[in-house]
Amino acid sequence: MVAPSGARRWIVRVTVKGQRNREGKPLRTDFGLGGADVVTLNEARDLALEYRRLAKQGINPRYNGRQEIPCFE
């Protein structure tokens, strides 16, 4: 996606299997994968593939990514 300012960023749109929005339509969500100057095309494709796999299993990547990983110090 290219913004009017010329900034470029990677975005993926996924449809989460089995989930519906308030209108009863399939739940579609856009995810930003990072700026094109920071994230390479291959990295963006890998992350997009992972998001699509989660969505196909019925897991919403938006909430799955926010799980905290315990850190033992």
Image (spheres, helix red, strand yellow):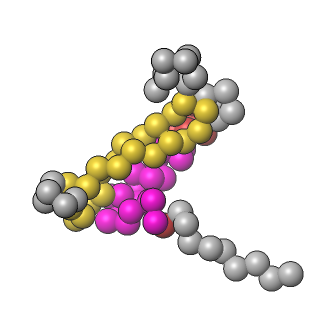
Residue extending furthest toward the bottom: 72
**Does 32 sit left or right of 25 as displayed?**
right
State the image quarter where residue 23 is shown: bottom left
Residue at the image position 38 percent from the left and 62 percent from the top: 60
**Does 50 sit left or right of 72 as displayed?**
left
Q: Is residue 60 magenta?
A: yes
State the image quarter where residue 67 is shown: bottom right
Q: Give the residues in magenta.
A: 46-63
Residue extending furthest toward the front: 5
Say how many tags the image has: 0
Q: Residue 48 in the image: state x and y as whole percent.
A: 47, 44
Residue extending furthest toward the left: 24
Residue at the image position 51 percent from the left and 38 percent from the top: 45
Q: Residue 17 in the image: state x and y as whole percent.
A: 26, 60
Magenta segment, principal secondary structure?
A: helix
Quick check: 8 above or below 46? above
**Does 62 sit left or right of 42 as displayed?**
left
Q: Is residue 38 magenta?
A: no
Quick check: 18 above or below 42? below
Residue nearest the observer in this picture, 32 or 40: 32
Residue nearest the observer in this picture, 40 or 1: 1
Residue at the image position 48 percent from the left and 53 percent from the top: 50
Residue extending furthest toward the right: 73
Residue at the image position 56 percent from the left and 24 percent from the top: 8
Q: Quadrant of the C terminus?
A: bottom right
Q: Residue 29 in the image: state x and y as whole percent.
A: 35, 49
Quick check: 39 above or below 16? above
